[in-house]
Amino acid sequence: MNAEDPAAAFRIEAGELLEQVEQGLLDLGHSLADMDLINAVFRGLHTLKGSGAMFGFDALAAFTHHCETAFDRVRKGQVPATAELVAVILSAQDHMRALVEGDAPDADGEAILARLQHALESASGAEPPVAEPGADRQGWRLFFRLPADAMANGTNPLMLLDELRDLGEAHIVARTDEIPPLPDLVATQCHIGWDVTLIGDISREDIEDVFIFVMDDMTLELEPLGDETSDDTAEADSCAVATSPVADTPQAGAPSSAAAASAAKAGESVRVPAERLDELMDRVGELVIAQSRLSQLAHDGDDLVLRSVSEEIERLANELRDTMMVVRMVPVASLFSRFRRLVHDLANDTGKQIALVTEGESTEVDKTVIERLFDPLVHIIRNSCDHGLETAAERAAAGKPETGTVRLSAHQASGEVLITIRDDGRGIDRERVRAKADANGLIQPGQVLSESELLSLIFHPGFSTAAQVTNLSGRGVGMDVVKRTIESLRGSIDVASTEGEGSTITLRIPLTLAIIQGLLVRVGNGSYVIPLAAVEECIELSLEEDFRSRGRSLINLRDRLVPFLRLRELFATGTKPDTHQKIVIVAIGNERVGLVVDQIIGNHQTVIKSLSAFHSGIATFSGATILGDGNVALILDVGQLVAMGQSVDTEEKIHAVG
Amino acid sequence: MQLADLADVGATEAHGIAWSERGEVEVLTFELSGEVLAIEAIRVFEILDVLTDTVVPGAPPLVDRIVNFRGKIIPVADLRLAFGMERAEQTVDSRIVVIELALDGEVTLLGLWADRVLEVATFVRSQCEEPPMVGMRWRREYVRYLARRPNGVAIVPDLRTILETVFFERAGS
């Protein structure tokens, strides 16, 4: 933290706070009376204002102050929460984000505040305040003492006292009984306690808010002034706070427990810069490589002691690797939650009723994968909302519920994460896809296309079926970008669609980008790694079969013709084929291709290293890895090879027909 | 691969030699099929004994090998091919000279095959000449300077042009 720019640190914190506030507001939009949510939003705004002012974001603090005030009134029951109010605060929250980034036009802020004022007025007009303000509280007597290291941690007691003074007429007396004798006194520590008498119509929450940042460590005794509230005094000692006004009672306990919970959370997790994790991952990768060299040495020799040490290290290295993977994993919840706002806005823009349902948010994915999934998912969800879902009237006419549902779910299946985006809209109009593809010259008129071939046309660059270009989607850029991004993650994308019932898009993403299980094969004199996840089976290609198949590269596999590529020829090794060549059948989605190799060596724990700029343009390889003996093996890019095989297949078919 | 970046860096590093105020430059000289080549010493990262290399099928022939350099995978270029020489077997004297290049704004390591590493020498400006317009066996643009040495001539190759050509050829194919 020391060397970091405090403003940058605040931006990160503010980003998270705004995220929380946004989630709270979106939830609140569905259940306007939920006091827990109202409190959560208020607390988020309050913290944002406080730390914003602390880090010199004065414009932000001033603006947030108004929203906080508005929410304070809601919280106190003076104004009911309305959909309008929530909407205004949502847009205000966007403005705050802009303020944090430092590029917000003033006029926006004023416009929002004007709307906020209007929303508050109409809300209070619509329904009078529910709760009477606490009638006869006249003030509080409190004593507080900060932990000794409070000042070192950045708390300024004078500011706390000033805040108390702002609440009402305050009479403050310092308690100096715990100040140690001069020789023992550490000047940077705080040993003073304060007795404060506050006079005025002040709620307990107001006082506790002053101490919100230091609440967990400090001593705070709080009791109402005067005898008329003496029945409350007994309760005041208990740590969960319950206060007098009737309407307040249910939510009164929430703030302090929420604060405690968030404090506990902060204690359990550590924020680490992403590049340090990447560095650590590199080191672990190197360790795994060195370890496999060691184990090879140990197994070649007869030294039993060496072998046992090597096995021990192997176990440790594997555990370390697994732990490292887990450290890099983040739940997709952080990704999914960002779409709630998107759907909310899309619903507003399109005038459709849209509900977003998310499932499997606890599924964990490598953090780099998460970051790179965001844009593709935005495209897909936009498409679902804009093209897929119908308007309420159309839905009613089709006998469906008026609210369209977009279901976003994630689950893990054998080393892959499946992310499914399903809508219950009208489905993809196959005729229109076809007509459009015809018009764009993507297919020949009358060309026979399978179901999946037809649907996959939507991933073609420059393809869009939207009859009319909206500002949401329909510009024909998007789905091809989506496909490319997913493929760059070594993932794949499938579309399924039933007319009238909706579409499902499934993304298959590898769990991690850094280490994969590979199948090590030999072609000529070179070793190559095929990602195991893509391998379906290995079969033998006998010499006579090879001879028979010469001239055509198709093999009959359980009554299906599968095209195959002779890697020896592809790589121009100039070597003779082994007598027992093997075909490794790999698949991406529904497309299969066989790769002819000379020998299958076995499983290989593959740490993926990228190729330099000189070689990154070669499509057949996605990277390289270091083998147990220190040599380098190239990793085959199965996606590219399958595409290559399919084109061979097409050529052969054309050949066969001609 | 951004050629522009390569060119930008090349303008300061490869095309122009960073002569000192006294008009001197330190170079590492090495032998390649009987010729002596010189690379600015400041760009040399490390000199390695020969490692087992791996062929990258489909790569431009000039840089079609990669090696494991302490856990990093780096490409190795055979400058013989730029100067029209035949590939050669490795000997006990063979080395890989690892140099630093800036590609796409990032420092990248590149190995250069050498039949034998000779010495670190100081070239003065007056002993270096631009390559002649005619009468050279090599592509003129691949040679930055010819330096007179007591027992012959050393080639100061223009690595920027050589590597750029590799990319243009690949882009063309």
Image (spheres, coloured by chain):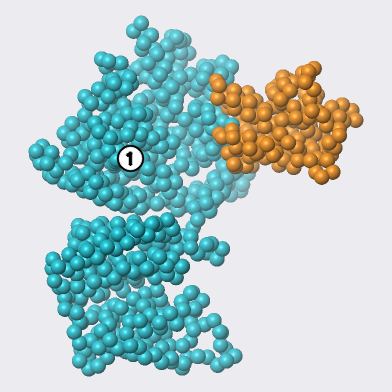
Q: Residues within 10 Å of mark 1 (few under 14, many from 20)?
A: some
Direction from residue B66 to residue A333 in the image, left or right:
left
Front residue of A16/A71: it is: A71
Q: Position of residue A398 (x, y in %)?
A: 10, 37
Tint applied to chain A in the drawing: cyan
The residue carrying mark 1 is A379
Q: Position of residue A294 (x, y in %)?
A: 60, 43
Q: Residue at x 45, y 51 (%)?
A: A328
Q: Residue at x 50, y 56 (%)?
A: A273
Placement of the C terminus of chain A among the 4 image quadrants: top left
Label 1 is found on which chain of the structure? A
Q: Position of residue A589 (x, y in %)?
A: 34, 30
For residue A483, above or below residue A9: above
Front residue of B50/B19: it is: B19
For residue A200, above or below residue A453: below
Front residue of A54/A599: it is: A54
Direction from residue A128 to residue A645 in the image, left or right:
right
Tint applied to chain B in the drawing: orange
